[in-house]
Image (tube, rainbow, N blue to C red):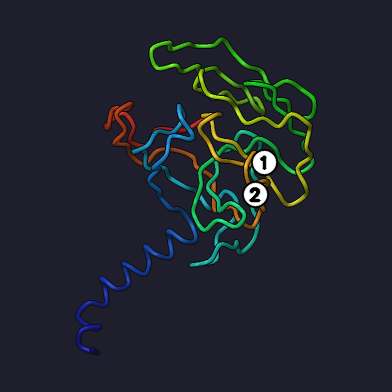
Amino acid sequence: MRKLLRNNLGFICLIMGMALFRTAVADWNPVPSSSMEPTIFPGDVVLVNKMLLGPSIPFTHSRLFSLGEPEQGDIITFYPPGIEKQYVKRVIGVPGDSIRTDGLRLYVNDQLVALGELDIDEQNRLITALETLNGRAHQVRVISNRSIVQVPDAITVPQGSYFVMGDFRNNSEDSRFWGFVPEENIIGKVTRLLLSTADERSFLSSLGQTLN
């Protein structure tokens, strides 16, 4: 055993270093679902920057210390309450925000979030619009013949928690279903694509593409 360890010490250190890097600094995750379309497609591999929120304690869900907090419009990875599976969604409300929805319209602190001109794909029954949240624009999408789960009465995001939704508003399981995301469940911020095998993207042009 000692001889085996001695002969493979460099490789073992490399593997351990990669594991520590992925758990504490940055990670990459394949996305299997369409809940964040048209921002993120199934087949995308996203880069998760854990240092933007604070370095993680290796092999845990906790952070050593906080460098900042998620903002409205950020895309984050996290564990929903009571679910041991990573999700990728967009932050809609931060602590203290009031949230309600009406169809595709979103209200934050009683202010209508700007919604640009609709793009209607009648063949695939898709409606896409440009939404501007916290001064940053991103696309949101719905299936025209499917209902949208609403937040008809304003709810306030409690301290230490966040309200998140998928960009594909009626094809996403998010805070409208299982509630707020505790801060300690947040893994990191999705900043860009690492690569993509999605049919909707060119493999070469997707390498390192920034995500809004």
Q: Determine whether 158 is above or below 64 in the image.
A: above
Q: Residue at point 33% right, 26% down? A: 200
Instruction: Give whichever of 78, 211 is nearer the camera.
Output: 78
Mark-to-mark CA distance, 2 and 1: 6 Å
Where disc 2 sits, the SS reads strand
Q: Position of residue 104 (x, y in %)?
A: 62, 21
Q: Position of residue 18 (x, y in %)?
A: 36, 62
Q: In the drawing, what numbered circle is on residue 195?
A: none
Residue under numbered circle 1 = 163
Where disc 1 sits, the SS reads strand
Q: Say few, some or many: other residues with alpha carbon within 10 Å of mark 1 (under 14 / 14 to 19 / 20 or more).
A: many
| Amino acid at pointer 1 | Phe
Q: Where is residue 13 in the image (x, y as percent from the top left)?
A: 32, 72
Q: Determine whether 178 is above or below 4 in the image.
A: above
Q: In which quarter of the image is residue 99?
A: top right
- Dots 2 and 1: beta carbons under 8 Å? yes
Which quarter of the rendering shows the N terminus?
Answer: bottom left
Q: Where is residue 9 in the image (x, y as percent from the top left)?
A: 26, 77
Q: Residue at point 53% right, 66% down? A: 60
Q: Residue at point 80% right, 25% down? A: 110
**Image side of residue 91 versus residue 40, left or right:** right
Residue under numbered circle 2 = 181
| Amino acid at pointer 2 | Val
